[in-house]
Amino acid sequence: MKIIIVGIGKLGEYLAKSLVKDKNDVTLIDLSFKRVQDVINNEDLNYIMGSGLNIDNLIEAGIKDTDLLISVMDKDEENVMCCLLAKKLGAKHTIARIRNQEYRESIDLIKDDLGLSMMINPEYLTASHIARIVGIPSALDTTTFFKGRVQMLSLKISKDSNLNRKSINEINKSTDGNVIVCAIERNKETLIPMGATKLENDDRIHVIGTPSSLLSFIKYAGLIKKPIKEVMISGGSDTAIYLAKILCDMKIKVKLIESLPERCEYLTEVLPKALIINGDVSDQNLLLEEGIEDCDCFICLNSIDEENLVYSMFAKSINVPKIITKINHINLSNIIDLAKIDTVVTPHIIASNQIVSYVRAMSNTDSSSCESIYKFKDFEMIEFKIKDNFEYLNTKIKNLNIKNDIIISTILRGRNVIFPGGNDVIKKHDTLVIVVNNKSNIKDINDIME
Amino acid sequence: MNKIVFKYLGKVMMMYSFLLFLPALVSLVYNEALLVFVFPAIISFIIGYFLNRIHCKDKILFSKDGFMIVTLSWIMISLVGALPLVLSVNGLSFVDALFESVSGFTTTGATVFKDVEVLDKSILFWRSFMHFIGGMGILSFVIAIAPLSRNDKSMYVLKAEMPGPSVSKLVPSIKKTLFYLYAIYIGLTLLEFILLLIGQMPIFDSILISFGTAGTGGFSLLNSSLATYSTFSKWVVTIFMFLFGVNFNIYFLLLIKDFKSALKSEELRVYISIYILSVLFIVINTYSMFNSMSEAILEGAFHISSLFTSTGYSIGDINIYPTSCRILVLMLMIISACAGSTCGGFKISRLIITVKSIKRDIIKSIHPNSVEIVRFEGKKVTEEVMTSTRTFMLLYAILIIIILFVVGLDGFNFEQTINAVFCTFGNVGLCFDLSSFSEFSNLSKIFLSIGMLLGRLEIFPIIALIKGFNTK
């Protein structure tokens, strides 16, 4: 696929890297050479210096036979304008980043007139992602497949958990195979588990199941936590507004701390249900006074990573049950591991995953298509639709020669969800969720075979 | 040093050993000593195999490693490429052979053989084939073929090898870009080969001359270079020498039918203007020496093509040129043709950028508060490109002076010394008052070889290598 990315910030850069890794022909357009220098030296892509709103630049980038243009410049208006231009010049699909909530609603109305295939709002996506995690108190992270029928949770095995020192086979026996443990993170490494693999204390496991089976799994594991009733958010960013709105709708009490008085006024205006507190989060007394010890979840959404990290560590030290931290720079991930912060969200990765899955779905329309993905450090989950070209239709799974480090975790057949064992077969029109190691480049379902 | 450098070198050497089998094939056809090529091929493969086996983790390639890979690869292939010349029946001393092979790979075409007509056919083939390999560069060949590993930062390597102030990719992916470049390169070579055949040149001669033209090399297979071929063949070679001096990006633009931008290219326009003016100048100054006007035009056009694009074929005695023409030719040799082509030298794009930046500085000194930017091909030239262009020019001059001094020790006359240095540094290979480089001392030959490499790789990679060894 030929893809043009206009505007190279954090999202643009990450997106470019992911798309090049998927073997797409990527061309970048950006005004500043400095910002992209690192990307063009290290990645196999082309670069045009100049404005993405300039027709000559777009033509030079080959807009005429481009499949997709992604506009992620700073301003919403520029992104819309760029996509409009691209559509006129012959781009097949366009994606624009639109952050402003008010625009978003009005642009939804004229989306088709503008020729936009997709709008992306990293802040909103981040907020709804966080809200999903808050909704399941035991989970460190979560995502859904098959329009919510199947869910993935990451859980941390504690010392007194029922799962500690149990093997996967034992777990499968006691849960009737209704959930599948598809990845284990241990000492910064990710394992794709076999039947004999044993779980250990402090492991972080990723399990897939239906919402109800997962609930009974958590109960069985002894990891159940009381539902979250009170949330404290630090930093009144746009993400915080989206999040607070969703949480209020979930009947959760929200306390939002913001240091700028003017911003607080605005927040009170748009978030009538939330309690807005004007103050400095770095002030421990303020946090204690506002009852950080009693809140069930502390969410850091300040704009500076280092602040988020420090506040989260403070919350951890006074045993807040759940802490969610926004980190913008992934380079910091090593330190985050050291700080033992469980749940980290990175807006541009969430947004990029959304776009990459859209691109993969686009490029796969004739063969078995891949629909949505979930990336986590070393492994990915991919959703595939099975079509005619799958070579092993109706073969028993135990007879398939599947590559190491790949698990077929779920099959959706019609409205039924199957957690496959060795005797199950894959049929046409099935949808699969596959867990793969990041290093194996799976673009087509046939790639999973040895 | 980064271990991945060795791994890269290993890949290059292994790929290179396969290329050595092509001249071996020729020696089979003509029933000549086969071992001359098989032996170096085996050596190269073994070296490559062991270098490739060096264990290294997913290390990241930095800019300086790119320079190292390129320089070391070129040195290695030149060393191994000299072996057939040492081993053959016409055996050369190692220094002579090295000079010849560096001259081949850098597409210079300066030879130490006084009589090339007695050489084995396979050796003749090898000399021209070196031009063909060196024309596009050995690493671009390896990158085009070898699988790219996950952390491959080949752009650094390509940047170090590709001539010109900045590398532009035709399409987003490196492999596809190289594919197009090679398609253009091989396509043009084939076209020339066919046209030469139509002009009733023997097949072997056509292949060799096509190779030599494509790489803008200049090794010929007759002592008289191209003087004895038909007028038609001479015109074909003239045109193709000119065509191989054009930036390959232009051909790509023509391929995708973007004629407008192709014709708008500033570099192409300057190239054509300089070419036509030079031919006119030569013809006006020399037509009295020829029997007919058409002969004078052919000679003028051929020699300007040959010297301007740093090829180095000749069809007559260029020593008859008066001083004015000689000075012009010397200037053309320094400038040379477009960036992104197969020629050596300073490149027209650098000339344009330098002239424009001088113009800007002059305007700035008259209107101190004015704001001026330098544009090239309609785009702003970044300050970094301008600085590196100026530095390049300065280094070019300094290095030429150093080599001049060393070669001057041999006691040739002033003009011969200057000619020899300029024509090797600019990768031209044809020069006034000298037919063979065999009489230079070994020291001069080594320095001239270094000069050829400096000229082909455009100085920076080699300086970076020396610096890299110094600072570890």
Image: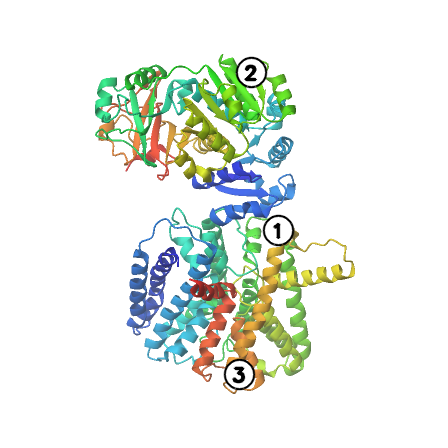
Query: Is A288 in front, or is B306?
Result: A288
Q: The residue tagged with tag 2: helix, strand or loop? A: loop
Query: Is B171 in front, or is B319?
Result: B171
Amino acid, disc 3: Gly
Residue B291 picture quarter = bottom right
Q: Would you call the spot at circle 1 few (<14 residues within 10 Å), some (14-19), or many (20 or more)?
A: few
Amino acid, disc 1: Phe
Marks 3/2 same chain = no
Amino acid, disc 2: Ala
Tell me, for residue A274, which label it has, or none.
2
Tell me, for residue B259, which label it has, or none.
1
Marks 1/2 same chain = no
Marks 1/2: CA–CA distance: 63 Å
Query: Is B178 in front, or is B301?
Result: B178
* Residue A285 appears in the picture as rendered: yes
Is A376 above or below relative to A163?
below
Marks 3/1: CA–CA distance: 49 Å
Q: The residue tagged with tag 1: helix, strand or loop? A: helix
Is B59 above or below relative to B36?
above
Q: Would you call the spot at circle 3 few (<14 residues within 10 Å), some (14-19), or many (20 or more)?
A: some
Marks 3/2: CA–CA distance: 87 Å
Residue farthest top in this picture: A251
